[in-house]
Amino acid sequence: MNKFDEKAQEWDENPEHVKRSQAIGITIRNHLSLSKDMKAFEYGCGTGLLSFELQPHLGDITMADNSDGMLEVLKEKIEERNASNLHPVRLDLTENDLPNEQYDLVFTQMTLHHIPDTKAILKSFYNILHPEGYLCIADLDKEDGSFHGKDVTDVHRGFDRAELTSMMKSIGFSDISFTTAYRIEKEIEDGSAKSFPVFLAVARKNV
């Protein structure tokens, strides 16, 4: 079972998850001129909180995740809200073939740090974008490991903005910008409270 399957039913009940998605959605809209003519792809969509924020401003959105539990909740929400432009799909770009389609916008939130090979997934995002399409990544700034805890070793400890910029440029992205979209206030293992910045990186596919 995917470790996110068991979290799926309660995911949207966490106000932190909702507020974070709202803030990231606002930041994306502030940086890009979205339109109904744009076809989008969200990777690591979970229960769809971010796509639902962007849904009124975009055309069709393909929503990919490898958690059956998350996708189950997502499908229920789509049906309840009659969100006909949202299309969930079970897909793991680290194992499965790339979609045949290309997109005007690829976006992802709090997913990159769970993917071992950062450069490989960035290349996949690049390859499914239309020429001059946009990539938006929301994730943790580099941190000391206290976000997930010292016993969690299968994640990146956030990302250095300069290093990520260099990697994206080497793949072919340009017009790369970073902004702080949100701050997660969290109690860490020693019982103290800590603030973890979440950046939004926006980049464009070179032609």
Image (tube, rainbow, N blue to C red):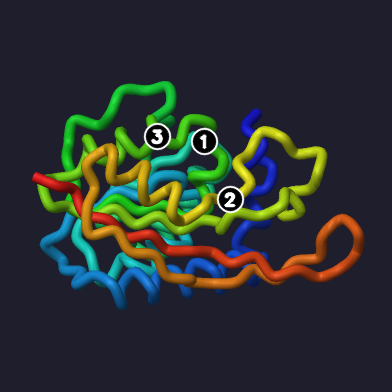
Q: Mark 2: which secondary structure?
A: loop
Amino acid type at image mark 2:
Gly
Q: Name the residue under label 1.
A: 115
> Which residue: 42% across, 63% down?
200
Question: N-terminal of the two: label 1 or label 2?
Answer: 1
Q: Name the residue under label 2.
A: 158
Q: Mark 1: which secondary structure?
A: loop
- x and y, in percent, of residue 8 in the image: 62, 49
Whether residue 61 is visible here, answered yes or no, is no
User: Which label belongs to residue 119?
Assistant: 3
- x and y, in percent, of residue 137 in the image: 40, 55
| Outermost residue, right side | 190
Question: Marks 3 and 2, how far apart in space?
Answer: 14 Å
Question: Marks 1 and 3, how far apart in space?
Answer: 10 Å
Are there few (<14), some (14-19), or many (20+) residues within 10 Å of tag 2?
Answer: many
**From the viewer's perspective, is residue 141 above or below residue 54?**
above
